[in-house]
Amino acid sequence: MKVRAVYALILLLAALPWFIGSRYIFHIATMITIMIPLVLGMHLMVRIGQLSLAHPAFWGLGAYASALLTMRLGMPPLLSLLVGAAVPSLVALAVGPIFLRIKGVFFVLLTFAFGEIVDLIFQEWTGLFGGNSGLYGIPKFSILGLRLTQIPHYYVLGLIAAILVYLLMRAIERSDVGAILESLNEDEMLSRSMGANALAWRVAAFVVSAFAAGISGGIYAFYIGFLSPDPFGFQTIVDLIVMVTVGGAGSVLGPVLGAIVTVPLPELLRDAREYQLMIYGVCLIGFMKFAKQGLISFIVDKRRGA
Amino acid sequence: MPHKGVARGETAVIAQMIVNGLLGGLIYVIMALGFTLIFGIMRIVNFAHGEFYMLGAVGVLVLFGNFGMNYFVAVVVAGLLTGALGVIAERVLFRSVVGEEMPGMIMSLGLSIILQSVVLLALGPEEQTVARPFSGIWRIAGAVVPWDRTVVSISAIIILVAFYIFLKFSRLGLAMQAVAQDPTTASLMGVESGTIYASAYGIACLLAGLGGALMAPIYTIGPYMGQSPMLKAFVVVVIGGLGSIPGAMLGGLLLGLTESVLATLMDSTTALIASFGVVLLVVLMRPNGLLGRTVR
Amino acid sequence: MTAPLLVVDSLTRRFGGLVAASDVSFTVAPGEIFGIIGPNGAGKTTLFNVIAGHYRPTAGRVSFEGKDISGHAADEVGRRGIARTFQAVHIFKNETVRANLHRAAVLARRHNPLTWLSRRPHATPDLEGTAAFLGLDMLLDNVAGSLAYGLQKTVGVGLAMMVGPKLMLMDEPAAGLNPSEKIAAAALIRRLRDERGISVLLVEHDMPLVMGICDRILVLNQGMPIALGTPADVKSDKSVIDAYLGEDYEFA
């Protein structure tokens, strides 16, 4: 019952921008929809017990790849969005078999170092990525001859992608694959003894979660129309951790709630970044101290269900 | 060859690399010791470690820079205040997440950004400096050694020796080592585990605070100055082995020397990429660190 | 005589300089219940872990149904049809018994993501039937972690059964059980063989249980095999009695 009420509330919020009609509200709503696939990707890794700090880098790889495929190779935007999202997936497939042998804090440091290297490459390979001065002139997204020129257009695009990725992640969670991933997280030795190839499943989850991050990156690139290495660094790691923590990792709905609550903050507090940091910090500590399972735990009683 | 000191001759270049490496490495050791102490005893990756370093530096900025207190007194007072804050943070925040890896990381990340924002509100975003209490240089084997760095290094060595004596000869220090080895022996030592957690976190913060206080006159002071030393400590501790005190010593000096060599031979970006590459390699080849014991 | 199911041939495992298992050879025939015993530190657990794929052998071979499986990872060993149970309780404690058994079937069926789409036909034992066999049918909807210790261990056996194994490795199946639970465990192991045709290789401390149900027994001492034979042979073996001398074991 409560879950349905939350779905209804989210739908209502999703429709809100059209009632208000302000460009600013549409912008915030679009940013929320863009962050949802990214945070859901991060969440899939949290579900298998790995805190990945590589996801902002995957986000950036998706963004630059989608933009460059359209700009340099003249690929149609929808195709470059999908192919662009496959780029971080392929990178995850390449590094995953090495990274995912490592667990816990070592994985955290490893993925952090990986993210820093990718961010440095964005900064230094100016010929391709434009460096710190940025990559300009990303064309508008278009699909079936429709050019997306207004913010509300991108909001619809983001909404569709967010819903699709949400449904994908929910399907994974409820399927046998979800049961396997959860089993591996709960008791790896037991799960392996029954024949499950732990590494292969972890790599698969890593690849899927990188794809979600890539989709988010691609839409971001087309929406903003300009890329610099700036958003793909440590600040986004903090944002994502706040979203997962505030929403709660216990259910796929958790990070979505986290994104809805968290993304508007920096936009609303644009002129007072120090307060934003303070609120983030208080949220992290408060939830860890009083509600480790996040907002979702107030809605769903058991760990599954939503 | 393109490196900087070629005119002074090869020996001088090498000597300079070693001196720079040791000067940098000693601070890494101080940071890494606290970081590894917290992990070894509480299983918490302390992302707020750099902020305690930053608070130590801010303490010197206020006490020495603004109030004109004697530099050394200011360093000690700043360190002690930071340590006291650490004890409070342990009691109020970290006690409830001891032994839980992910909540511990998230909690410390939260504390880290709160401390940053508090200092940002108090000092503003501009980087600040304090007057250097020492100036001038001396030379060894053709290498230039600034006096201020010398004072920092000697102080660091004194702190390290004191820390060593504490660990080896005090009852609390011995109990801490025992807990780091095997948590169940804590009660056998007759020291209450809460006391051990509080003192471990407090001492680690005291070390970080002293490190920051010592470095205050050398670098600029600002809310984000702790991020880089925290990362260095994390790297050192992973290289040396999480929870290993000798590993932190060795790892710190090793990282200092590596950075100094890389910075001499390459441009800074390449050096940064190379050093992350080294980290990747070490984690992959020896996941328990060079001197590490098996963690689970 | 039929071909042996499991062949362990001159198996040695060293840890640094320490020899934990030295030149151990034995076979397990189809339909056999085979026990490994020995005083503490005899190398039983090491041997078990090498067969289960947790350690590589330093020397020697393990083969199953005529195929070399030495040094295969634990999941590969599982996929060959060798299931295992654990000394401590290893089950999914937050899930119901039904969900536990279902997960075991899923884990055994879908080995890796690439086989996800091409689901190979795999004879998974029927869930209800397995539960009935174990006497867990009334408890299917109970949360596994809330059951009594002995029943939790039984759920562990159920997980191994859902893999559809030909051989079950059991690491101290009686550890932590009270006397009546031990009797039930012994009966269960026999029924696994008699009614399900599963061969059993077990490592155990409890002498009466081992002597009562095993067809043949291997005795290890300090990593070395010192006797191999029927319970009666082993009980009267001089070197076995010497090895256990001073230990408080009861040869029932």
Image (cartoon, helix red, strand yellow):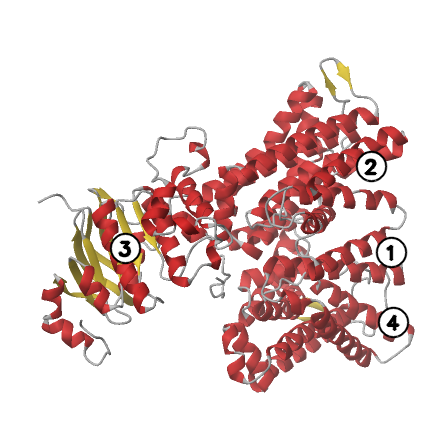
The picture places residue A27, in percent across and down from the top left corner, at 83, 33
User: Is residue C229 placed above or below B83 in the rendered structure?
Assistant: above
Q: Which residue is mark 2?
A: A28
Query: Label 4's element?
Result: helix
User: Where is residue B119, by image quadrant?
Assistant: bottom right
Q: Amino acid at mark 1?
A: Pro
User: Where is residue B127, by image quadrant?
Assistant: bottom right
Cβ atoms under marks 2 and 3 closer than 8 Å: no
Q: Dot 3 falls on which chain? A: C
Q: Nearer the viewer, mark 2 or mark 1?
A: 2
Residue depicted at x 85% and y 59%: B120
Residue depicted at x 37% and y 47%: C131
Q: Nearer the viewer, mark 2 or mark 3?
A: 3
Query: For residue A90, which numbered disc appears in the image?
Result: none
Q: Which residue is mark 1?
A: B125
Front residue of B97/C196: it is: C196
Residue depicted at x 13% and y 69%: C235
Give the mark nearest the N terminus, 4 or 1.
Answer: 4
The quadrant in which the C terminus of chain A is found is: top right
Front residue of B264/C55: it is: C55
The picture places residue A191, in percent across and down from the top left corner, at 42, 48
Cβ atoms under marks 2 and 4 closer than 8 Å: no
Estimate the spatial distance between the alpha carbons at disc 3 and disc 4, rounded to whole Å: 75 Å
Q: Dot 1 falls on which chain? A: B
Query: For residue B62, which numbered disc appears in the image?
Result: 4
Query: For residue C188, which numbered disc appears in the image?
Result: 3
